[in-house]
Amino acid sequence: KVQHELANRGIAAGLLRNSDIAITLDQRAISANAARPAIYVALHAANSGTGVHVFTSLLPAESVSSRDFLPWETAQTAYLDLSGAVAGSVSAELETRKLPNATLAAPLRPMNNIAAPAIAIEIASPSNDVNDIASAAYLDQVAQSIAAGIAAVRGKIPEVRP
């Protein structure tokens, strides 16, 4: 749904996987970095909690350029500001649609290893009933929010990375 919503906004999106196959965290980061994406978005379904949680990396801010050599464990450091802008924009779109959400920083892999603006989105049920996560209307609104949030910051994100 997110890929379709992005395409509707003229934004190409590739998938690391489109089924429930196992890919290690390192394989995800290697594949993502090799693709040189403008933005990396990890999507996960949650069976606990409610609403949508938008995560950015919890790395200490450092003065690092994306043109520098980026150490594997902290490659995301050079992109923290842009990642925060993407997360804030997606969160604002979720708010516009009155979807419960929170924006948080967390030490998540493979995000710390991604050399591009990166966010992780955890989608839980909108209510206390876990079965509500399968609601087509809810998932459509979440996908629209994610795509609209990315589209809103598109001009701030370089399309071609060094």
Image: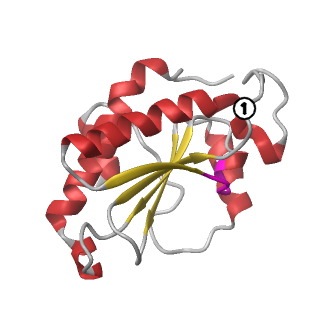
Q: Based on the picture, tell me whether residue 138 belongs to the magenta stretch.
A: no
Specify whether 64 is left or right of 45. right
Q: Type of residue at label 1?
A: Ala
Residue named by callout 1: 61
> Image quadrant for the C terminus?
top right
The percent coordinates of residue 26 (x first, y second) are: 74, 59
Q: Which residue is drawn at the image coordinates 60% and 74% (left, top)? A: 22
The percent coordinates of residue 23 (x first, y second) are: 63, 68
The percent coordinates of residue 9 (x first, y second) are: 26, 33
Q: Is residue 66 above or below residue 107?
A: above
Q: Does the rendering let one see residue 38?
A: no
Q: Which residue is drawn at the image coordinates 24% and 61% (left, top)? A: 139
Quarter of the image where one finds residue 13: top left
Q: Which residue is drawn at the image coordinates 36% and 40% (left, top)? A: 90
Specify whether 129 is left or right of 72. left
Specify whether 43 is left or right of 2. right
Per the rendered image, the range of residues in magenta is: 106-111
Quarter of the image where one finds residue 135: bottom left
Q: Based on the picture, tell me whether residue 107 belongs to the magenta stretch.
A: yes
**Residue in the foreground of this view, choosing between 8 and 152:** 152
